[in-house]
Image: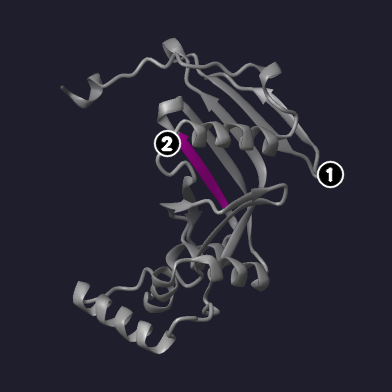
């Protein structure tokens, strides 16, 4: 079948204004819990878009590790491509896609580092192998082959022991949202789109957008 002929008719749910909460974070957690309850694989997987100093965008999937009134948090190597780009241009976008529920959430805002204490606390609960991996990998840097990577891991494991400390170049990032859009697929491509925008005083307004 040609790619152009691939088509899905969305008709499972609707999203009307009176169904949404005035607080988009409450609305997000409502949808997120429904995604978890539906048994979706990796419901916390989200696409992160950043922009380099040259204005070129880049994308990757990362895992949400916390969502609260302050924003959306994930953890990474600050020296990775995304870390370097965010250090120069702290504006970014996130997208969650839950196809089984025919839903998307798009989030835009400013990114900041979480506190060292929060990064330490999360690093401490990661599996030991993952902590060693954070020590071993120079994320986004070229490497000669898999064998070299495994050698780096073995060396890091030998040096770290059973209680490795969090490296200074690894930690949390939090996106403070300024705009959040909830997208619910509908039949005939007449999708429901409810967008929230935060004003300078921190108050949220919401509006329906045409599909």
Tell me which colouring the rendered structure shows: one colour
Determine if the magenta segment contains residue 205. no
- Say few, some or many: other residues with alpha carbon within 10 Å of mark 2 (under 14 / 14 to 19 / 20 or more): some
User: Residue 55: horizontal and vertical position, in percent?
Assistant: 48, 56
Look at mark 2 in the image and give the residue it sits on: 40
Mark number displayed over residue 118: none
Q: Under tag 1, what secondary structure?
A: loop
Residue 119: percent from left, percent from top:
60, 69
Q: Crowding near pointer 1: few (<14 within 10 Å), some, many (20+)? A: few
Q: Which residue is mark 1?
A: 201
The extreme top residue here reads 188
**Relative height, residue 206 to residue 176 (above, below):** above
Q: Earlier in the sequence, mark 1 or mark 2?
A: 2
- Can residue 145 be seen at all in this image of the molecule? no
User: Taking 42 as reference, is 13 left or right?
Assistant: right
Q: Quadrant location of residue 107? A: top right
| Viewer-nearest residue: 200 or 187 | 187
**Would residue 192 be seen by someone viewing this image from the given angle?**
yes
Asked if residue 56 is positioned above or below residue 19 in the image, the reply reads below
Q: Position of residue 88 (x, y in %)?
A: 56, 66
Quarter in which the N terminus is drawn:
top left
CA separation, marks 1 and 2? 36 Å
Give residue 159's position: percent from left, percent from top.
Answer: 40, 89
| In the rendered image, the vertical position of residue 58 relative to residue 35, given as above or below | below
| Residues drawn in magenta | 92-97
Q: Residue furthest left?
A: 1
- Give left or right: position of 15 versus 143: right
Q: Is 96 a magenta residue?
A: yes
SS under mark 2: loop
175 on left or right of 145: right
Is residue 124 positioned above or below 86 on the image? below
């Amino acid at each position: 079948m040609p790619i152009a002929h691939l088509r899905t008719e969305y008709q499972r749910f609707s999203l009307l204004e009176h169904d949404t909460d005035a607080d988009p974070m409450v609305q997000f957690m409502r949808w997120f819990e429904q995604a978890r309850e539906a048994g979706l694989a990796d419901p916390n997987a989200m696409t992160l878009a950043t922009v380099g100093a040259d204005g070129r965008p880049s994308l990757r999937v990362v895992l949400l590790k916390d969502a609260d009134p302050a924003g959306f948090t994930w953890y990474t190597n600050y020296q990775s491509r995304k870390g370097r780009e965010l250090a120069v241009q702290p504006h970014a976008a996130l997208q969650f896609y839950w196809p089984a529920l025919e839903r998307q959430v798009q989030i835009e805002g400013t990114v900041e580092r979480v506190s060292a204490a929060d990064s330490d606390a999360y690093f401490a609960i990661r599996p030991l192998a993952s902590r060693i991996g954070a020590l071993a990998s120079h994320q986004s840097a070229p490497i000669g082959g898999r064998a070299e990577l495994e050698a780096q891991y073995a060396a890091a494991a030998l040096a770290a022991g059973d209680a490795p400390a969090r490296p200074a170049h690894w930690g949390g990032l939090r996106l403070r949202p300024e705009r959040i859009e909830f997208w619910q697929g509908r039949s005939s491509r007449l999708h429901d789109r409810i967008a929230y925008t935060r004003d300078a005083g921190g108050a949220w307004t919401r509006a329906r957008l045409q599909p």
